[in-house]
Image (cartoon, coloured by chain):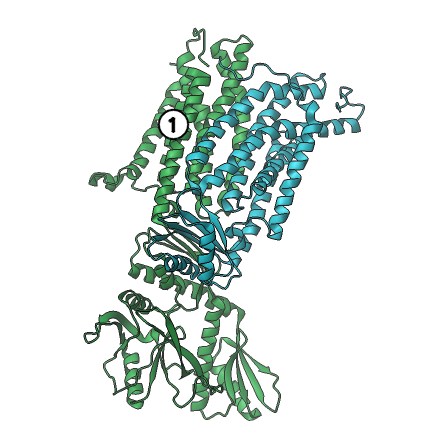
Amino acid sequence: MPKGAGWRIALIATFVVISCVYLLPTLSPNLPEWWKGILPKDKIHLGLDLQGGTHLVLEVETAKAVEGTLDLVATDLEDTLNSKNLRFKRVSRTGSDKVTILMYEKDTSAEVQKLLKDKYRDYEIVPTVEEGGLVGLALRMKEQDIQDRKDKAVAQALETIRNRIDQFGVSEPIIARQGVNQIVVQLPGIKDPQRAIALIGRTARLEFKMVKEGVSPTGGAVPEDAEVLYEKHTDPTTGATTEIPIVVQKKALITGDLLTDAQVRIDSQFNQPYVGIEFNSLGARLFDQITAANVNKRFAIVLDSTVYSAPVIRERISGGSAQISGNFTEKTASDLAIVLRAGALPAPVKIIQNVTVGASLGKDSIDKGLMAGAIGVSLVICFMAIYYKLSGMIANLGMVLNILYLMGAMSALGATLTLPGIAAIVLLVGMSVDSNVIIFERIREELRLGKSPKSALEAGYDKAFLTIMDSHVTALITAAVLFQFGTGPVKGFAVSLSLGIMINLFTSLMGTKVIFDLFLHKGNVKKMSI
Amino acid sequence: MMEFLGKTSFDFIGKRNISFVISIIISLVGLFAIIQMARGVANMGIDFTGGTSIQVKFDKAVPIADARKVLHNGGIAEFELQEVKDGNKLLVKLPQKSALAVGKAAEIVPAAFTKAYPDMKVAVESTTEIGPSIGAKLRKDTIIAVAISMLGIICYIAWRFDFKFGIGAVIATLHDVLAMFAVYYLTGREFNLLFITAVLTIAGYSLTDTVVVFDRIRENLHKDLKGSLHKIFNNSINEVLSRSIITSLTTFLAAIALFVWGGEVIHDFSFALLVGIIVGVYSSVFVASPVVLLLEQRALNKEPGKTGNTQPAKA
């Protein structure tokens, strides 16, 4: 054996074994129990473009969360001022960071200021300039608090979305925060993407509001404390939707956060699904009081500013349960139950990216990708065997090692294989023999100079070393950049490419060399098959 | 020993005036393509412009003209239709500014077809919806990515060789990139994220050939201190010509398999790779080395006392 060949062979063999061990979970789905205990079970994951699925990027409208908080402060403050008999014209949120109180007299203002200082320590209190003899005071949220609120809103939204997806039932979803206000959701293998997207993107703010009777919704002037909302009706046979305007009070009497449970039930009389909801104790008490005080009046159940139903309160309802009916199908009812159980999003989310690949297209892509890969590999193998004969076969062996190592490494890292990733592997097949081509051409040159096969081999590897190094480093630079900026399929491409380049460096400089050394180490080989 | 090319002695450097003209034309077309992209008149993928694209599969062929009518009747005013290479498939692209909100388009498009052809099976194979902010961010990221990789390459080559070689390598790489833009633009293919991926891959890959040639030039410059630069450069290119071609050929073989058998999703991507591989060989011979030679000669002319072995370039 040539000097130093032993440990090199050992190293190569070790890597082969490690790669096989890591690859096994990917190749065979049913591993014996004893394997699972100690040995790796990470698989190469298939990207959404190969197995089908949905990739969503959601943007949380965090400014709305801050506004929501300020709206609550405004309502709360209004109640406080009323209860203390302090006269004011209006309390409302102004702009994106303030609540402004308009009063008639300086004296009230002084008193209110004292109260604000006491109650809202985290806010800055600034006087505002008002016209018409009014006095204004503004509560301003501090920049730091605004940022905190926004940050918390994204975290809450993520948690809520995770809950919804868990209840919807998707295997191995990925839900992660990205950047300041974005959430990435990946749903592999999902059957009904539109439904899932609707479920995730819904704010699901449930409110119970009293219907303002005696005001025409179409007749123009709506009182300041009321608003016009629409009730949607879908005709089950024609599919046509009609919208009925309803005037309701702006102030919500009960909101969705007082719920403890929501379940789909079937109305025994009409065989219609509805959603039964349960209130917590505070909710139950409020519901009891409100229904008692408003018998024979209409009550609107509003979800995300759409009226679901506006039934007449027939009698006082105690016990803390109620039902939401509307034109539900079983699916829409169950989706509504899910979002009500999981809770509302703290702020609306916008879907800014949605890439959905159907399972059949994914299957098609993976089949064709593997097919093209196999053909590409065969073409290269044939070419090398014909052009470089036995040496070409050694290069081919190196290439096979390359692929094995690469798949093993991807398995070990739990990397994701995408269609461009398969393309990268095929490309690497071409590139992995490139290093050998550079070496072989150099060896041929040395042989032409009349050197013996052994010294030609040494010289060939020596002189080609730097060239190979240089070309790999430059390729690695761009692969690293791709990895840094790419998302989804492109990232998969960059992962395959960068790993492949590094592995290729090893096999071309170490793997194939040792085989040549074994053949030629005696120095008495007269002719080289190259 | 099997060889495609025996010992060659082409005068590559002597042909540089012709090759420069060709390269400049290609690059100008590439630049034009980029300007058209910036103006938004090139065939841009929705990755960059934002909007929605939906691939619909039918069980019977639907002529494009009919599909156009169906979508118009379905209340979609603005859209682009593209036929997909195999199968009865159509790609419908809706621009960002059309009134359809993200999320709705995926329902309206197949609904329009189902309404028009009640007996036909209409399946949505894939949907991509990109909001405007993502498109803008991607455009910015792409420019940064290309700039960073170019900078990385110039630094590495400058460190390994010298600055003149670094310039030569970057000009050759830029040339390859522009050529890919040019071919893509002229063949009316869609500029999307996969195309940019192909471009960056080729930017890294095409350097392999350039580095092989540069290595040989450097080696020969050290061996032969007296000979004319023109001759040394020419000989070096001729010496490594067969390996430049064979290394590209092996990669080309792999890429052509992807192009022919890889399926619709990576069809254009592999086309870009094929173009890049071919242009990469051309540029390492006809762009990178002549540029370095020009720079070397200019440097020598500035210091006349140093050596006298410059030979005036042949016209």
Q: In the figure, residue A208 lies in which quadrant?
A: bottom left
Residue drawn at 44 percent across, 12 percent down: A529
> Is any part of residue B219 visible from this angle?
no
Query: Relative to residue B147, is residue A63 drawn left or right?
Result: left
Residue A157: x and y in percent read 40, 64
Residue drawn at 39 percent across, 87 percent down: A212
Query: Relative to residue A51, is residue A128 drawn left or right?
Result: right
Residue B152: x and y in percent read 58, 39
Asked which secondary structure carries label 1, the reply is helix
Instruction: Indicate the colour of chain B.
Output: cyan
Could you tell me which chain the residue with mark 1 belongs to?
A
Crowding near pointer 1: few (<14 within 10 Å), some, many (20+)? some
Residue B45: x and y in percent read 52, 50
Residue drawn at 57 percent across, 25 percent down: B212
Q: Is residue B210 above or below residue A228?
A: above
The residue where tag 1 is placed is A400
The answer to which of A275 and A74 lies nearer the viewer is A275
The answer to which of B224 and B197 lies nearer the viewer is B197
Instruction: Indicate the colour of chain A.
Output: green
> Extreme left residue here?
A268
Residue type indicated by callout 1: Val
Query: Relative to residue B249, is residue A364 drawn left or right?
Result: left
Residue A478: x and y in percent read 53, 39
